[in-house]
Image (cartoon, grey):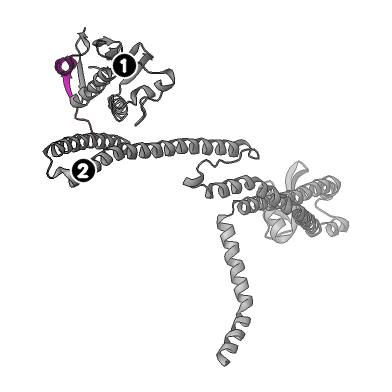
Amino acid sequence: MIKSLLRALLNIILYPFKLIFRFIIGFLKRLKFSIALKISASYLAIYVIIIMIVAAATSVGYLVYEFDKFNSEVIINDAEEIAETFPKFSQNIVSRVKSFEIYDDNLNEVYPLNSGKGYADSIIVVIEKLIYDREYIYSTNFYNDNVEYYLNISYDAQEMINNSVRISIMVMISGAIGLLIFLPIVSGISYKMIGPIKKMTDTTKTITVNNINTRLDIKGAQDELKELSQTFNEMMDRIEAGYKTQQQFVSDASHELRTPIAVIKGYVNMLDRWGKNDRAVLEESITAIKNETDNMQDLIEKLLFIARSDKGTLLYTKEDFKICSILNEIEKETKMIDTKHELYFKFYEDASLYADKKRIKQVLRILVDNAIKFTPPGGYIMVSGFIQDDYYVIKVEDTGIGIEKKDLEKIFERLYRAEQSRSKEIGGHGLGLSIAKIIVLGHKGKIKVKSSVGKGSEFSVMLPYL
């Protein structure tokens, strides 16, 4: 009970200090992170500096004006009277000025003797006397009996300096009063300027994979903030498109793997039930499992190829070689495996390439295999090679089913297959053209396609040659 009372009493005593500590911490955090506070503080500092400059300029201006007026109304008359009455001076002039000294043409003191003051005609000396002695010195010269003399007249400047200080203080007080009006206006403007940024920050904090379509509102933004918002929205459009493509890719890949796995599982179950004693079922199951395993291996290798390309770890083993050496291999292999189509190979020119020979052959194999798959028996397939400008062009033409116009822009996308190619007999994963494009672009080349439904397709690979 006593401990609880002591703890409560201690909390009450420390409460004000906790409040002060929290206020200081909050203020420091705002000072560190609040742009609006920094802008307001900057404007405040500029305002204070301007007020101080205005006060100093007004004060100095007043002094200059008063001294100029004093020179014309008083000092010039006093200097003339001293020159006219030299070397005897009236008591009137002696009492009117604080002091005066006269020097000969060698700047030796003539009046009064041994005053210890030297002739002062430097602005630095004048300013120093004003600051430290509150005394204004006027320097001039005059002639008496054809002899040149130099004159210093000193006046008490305390009153004029005091008036100057008063004016300076009045300007600062006016500035302080103006600050009471200026500060809330600047603070409001600063927070209004930062408002869109804060809104952008709050919006970006809510963006996740579940609402990746969220965008910044650019209605209230101006100038650079509007440009920043538009740039951010464009970036999010690209991220969303990439994310959706990735989702679709994962979904399609999963679907492609699901089918062979289901087939393998079905045959394994069949083996488990009847295949142990039935030789025909055993052989059928083994053949089917082997085919589906090969199919899965091919798909996984293609997916790994694309993944390495995305990661930037795909390497090419480049070497110098003649392109016709590959084209001749493609011709020989194609004529061996395809006897259902009319095949034409025409290589008009040869050229040296610096490229990955294996990958270039892979590209051509993909295009020729597609031409074979999508061309009905009896149709013709033509592969040609020639030099055009800075590229060696390889064309693969066929009289197959062709590609619809709406599919032309998508055929190089991963796992994309046009409606005409989705039949079970044709097969495929929709990765071949994606891989071909990656390889061609990796060799700084180009790949193009022309196609008409029912008339056939024409693929062109353009590779830079040596």
> Residue under circle 1?
459
Q: Residue at x 74, y 59 (%)?
A: 134
**x%, y% of residue 17?**
61, 76
> Residue under circle 2?
270
Side (left or right) of 116 relative to 425:
right
Q: Is residue 122 visible?
A: no
Residue neighbourhood size for the residue with mark 2, other residues' Cα within 10 Å, grouped as few (<14), some (14–19), many (≥20): some
The segment highlighted magenta reads: 314-339
Side (left or right) of 435 relative to 28:
left
**Does the CB distance between marks 2 and 1 fall below 8 Å?**
no
Q: Quadrant of the C terminus?
A: top left
Q: Secondary structure at mark 1?
A: strand
Q: Secondary structure at mark 2?
A: helix
Amino acid type at image mark 2: Met
Amino acid type at image mark 1: Phe
- Considering only vertical position in the picture, is 340 above or below 363? above
**x%, y% of residue 140?**
75, 46
Q: Nearer the viewer, residue 194 or 52?
A: 194
